[in-house]
Each structure stands twice: as C-alpha cells, then as structure tokens.
Image (spheres, rainbow, N blue to C red):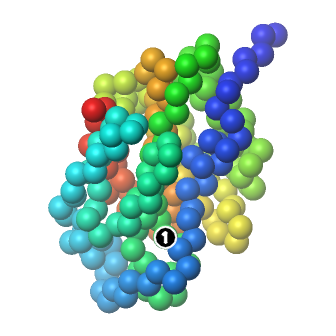
Amino acid sequence: MNRINLNIGFGLVIATIVGFVPLPGLTVQLKAENFSELIKQNNSGLEAYQNTKNNFSIRHPENWRINEGEDGVMFISPKESEADDFQENIGITVQNLANNQADLNQIAVASLEQLKKVITDFSLVSSTETTLENIPAKQFVYTGKFGDFDVKWLQVIALEGDNFYIITYTAKASSYNDYLNLVEEMVSSFKKI
C-alpha cells in the first residue's frame, strides 16, 4: 500500500477546520424579534473584499469583522446579543503545495482522516463534488464538539496547480442554518484574481 505524505501540516488543518475565534470585549447589541430576518436585512448588500497576497476576492456582509492572516482571511459575524458566546465565521485559506504530488481526492481523504483525530465526536454529514469558480472541488459538512460547543462546519476545498483553496464556515449547530444561504452566496462569489 502506497502512503502519500501530504505536507499541509497540522496547523493548516486546525486553522481551516476550527475557525472559531473568541473575541473578548467585542460587543454589538442588536435587537430584533426574528434574528434570521435581521441577518437578511443586514447582509442583503455584500461588499467586495480583495486579498492581493493570496490572489482572490470574495463578497462579504459589510457588518462582519475582517481578520486577515498570512495565508488568508476570516470574516466574523457580529454578536447577536451580549450573551452570544460564539460568533459564526467564514475562513478562507490559500496554501501553496508546490512539492506535493497528491491530487484533490487524496487530499480530501487525508483531510477527513485528520478531522477525525482533532474534532471530538466528529461526524461526517455529507461529502459532495462541487466547483469553486469552475475549479473541481469537494464540499464537506461535518459536526463535532469544540470545547463546550456543538459545532457544525461546511468546508469547500479545491486544488488548482500548486494552490490549495479552503473555505470553512463554522457555526454552532443550532444556528448553522441561519447563515447557510448567506454562506452559499459568499462561496459562490469567490474569484481568483
């Protein structure tokens, strides 16, 4: 049996699957009878974001906080209330895999194996073929425990040339569907520049 050594590293896997970023001291007070309706109102107009270092653009809600890093960016939803202890987010990472001989299917298998090791009570909900700006891609939906939280993730991975693209939506399982349409709109707006 041949083993493939994927040089994507443990740090990359953690950064792309966990996505949760505690933001102590950041408080946005919102009052609405129906929070899903408030999300639709506040996010009806997405604004453009461009990451010239990693050569991509994406549209995002203007009221979401942007946290840029070396390999990508994270968009973090505003708090729903002062008691909100988990902020839903979308992280985009671009990794250069120049010396890696693995294809997307091999990377997908290795990624799922790694997820099983780092997420407590990991459960794969779905695994489907998709595209990311016309690039063949894989989409995973999975659940598990992160600290005290029951979390649900949606992740899209794509490989084009040496560039490995990872888009990860992270939410409490109970609020996952509240943001899903918005997340799908964001993912479909992803463009290489």
Residue 44 lies in quadrant: bottom left
Q: Tell me residue 133's x, y (percent).
A: 31, 30
Mark 1 secondary-structure assignment: loop
Evaluate whether residue 178 shows in this view.
no
- Does residue 78 appear in this view? yes
Return the residue found at the far top. Answer: 1
* Position above or below: 190 against 137: below
* In the depicted structure, whether residue 68 falls above or below residue 13: below
Examine the rendered structure and indicate whether residue 5 appears above or below residue 140.
above
Mark 1: amino acid: Gln
Residue 85 placed where, x, y %?
56, 78
Q: Which residue is mark 1?
A: 87
> In the image, is 118 to the left or to the right of 13?
right
Which one is in front, 12 or 105? 12
Residue at image location 29% in from the left, 70% down from the top: 63
Q: Position of residue 181 (x, y in %)?
A: 32, 55
